[in-house]
Image (tube, rainbow, N blue to C red):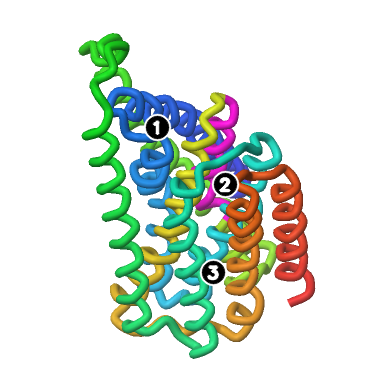
Amino acid sequence: MAFIITVLLFAVGVIFVVKGGDYFVDAASWIAQVSGIPKLIIGATIVSVATTLPEMFVSVMAALQEKVDMSIGNAVGSVTANIGLIMAIALVCMPGVIRRKDYLLKSVLMLLAATIIILCGFSGEISHAFSLLLLVIFLIFIVDNIITAKNTLTARQEDPKGENLTGRRTVMVNIVKFIVGAIGIVWGANLLVDNGSELARLAGVSERIIGVTLVAIGTSLPELITTITAIAKKQSALSVGNILGANIMDLTLIMPLSSLISGKPLPVSPTSALIDLPACLLVGLIAVVPTFIRSKFSRWQGFALLAVYGIYVVVTCFLV
């Protein structure tokens, strides 16, 4: 009976995440249209904050419960899953030309944060000093988004077509969609993680493997659903912006908070330092470097990311 209930709750989680993602992307696109803020910025801030909540909740709680491998594995594993699986799907389905200046700083901040995390792996822990450095990167990310949004709003005259998007009923519908979508994504993801982890534990899977695979993918489901929904609605900037923003938050906000809230440095296991952290940086380099050389996202990058992520999962689950 308990097994059936666990499976049913897992299925309910899928429904909540899927429908929540649909509502959330609709509302986020409406915010971008009405405000004049670029969809890349909306994706990298508002959408990213909401879709990162599951990772934040799981990692901080795991750190407080001294489940360090799961805390670090979830945050780093989520970034690897976001790029190697979710962004890969977006690139395979929707490659496209980019403007370097739109993505440059966010990409650099993400890679810088991943590099700092690797240095933490070499030192054996995420110290409070490294945590504060990561928080500085997070603040730079937020300030850049605020400045970009402010400049865009100042430079852009009010769109006369926007009047049709600001009627009372339209505003209320989109506010409700935004809130319900965010709640559905977060609640659904938590149901998936809780019940999926329980099934994994029954199979005798280790805490680290649960963290970097099942929990990481589970807490990345909001990004996955948001990306799939954005692809269906042809909102590629919203999708990529969401992934970049979520990754920066995973590395520069969630991990430092886990360390600072727990009151002590988070130890990094040798296995994580050797496999998980380099894998995170590798998929980031594959996604970013060729893009800035050629000024576009290419489909081959998506396939390469999927291949690397597949190898990483196999190595993690079967060879370590």
Instruction: Name the side, left or right, on which 27 lies relative to 95.
Output: left
Give whichever of discs 3 and 1 has the lower sequence position: 3
**Residue identified by numbered label 2:** 6
State if disc 1 and disc 2 touch (CB < 8 Å): no
| Residue drawn at x 46%, y 44% as measured from the top left | 241
Badge 3: residue crowd in 10 Å (few <14, some 14–19, many ≥20): many
Q: Amino acid at mark 1?
A: Gly
The picture quadrant where one finds residue 180 is top left
| Residue drawn at x 37%, y 80% as measured from the top left | 130
| Residue drawn at x 55%, y 38% as measured from the top left | 227
| Residue drawn at x 59%, y 68% as measured from the top left | 281
Q: Which mark is residue 181?
A: 1
Choose between 37 and 131: the one closer to the eye. 37
Magenta range is 217-232
CA distance separating discs 3 and 2: 23 Å
**Residue identified by numbered label 3:** 73
Give whichever of discs 3 and 2 has the lower sequence position: 2
Quadrant location of the N terminus in the rendered image: top right
Q: Which mark is nearer the camera, 3 or 2?
A: 3
Badge 1: residue crowd in 10 Å (few <14, some 14–19, many ≥20): many
Instruction: Name the side, left or right, on which 94 lies relative to 144.
Output: right
CA distance separating discs 2 and 1: 23 Å
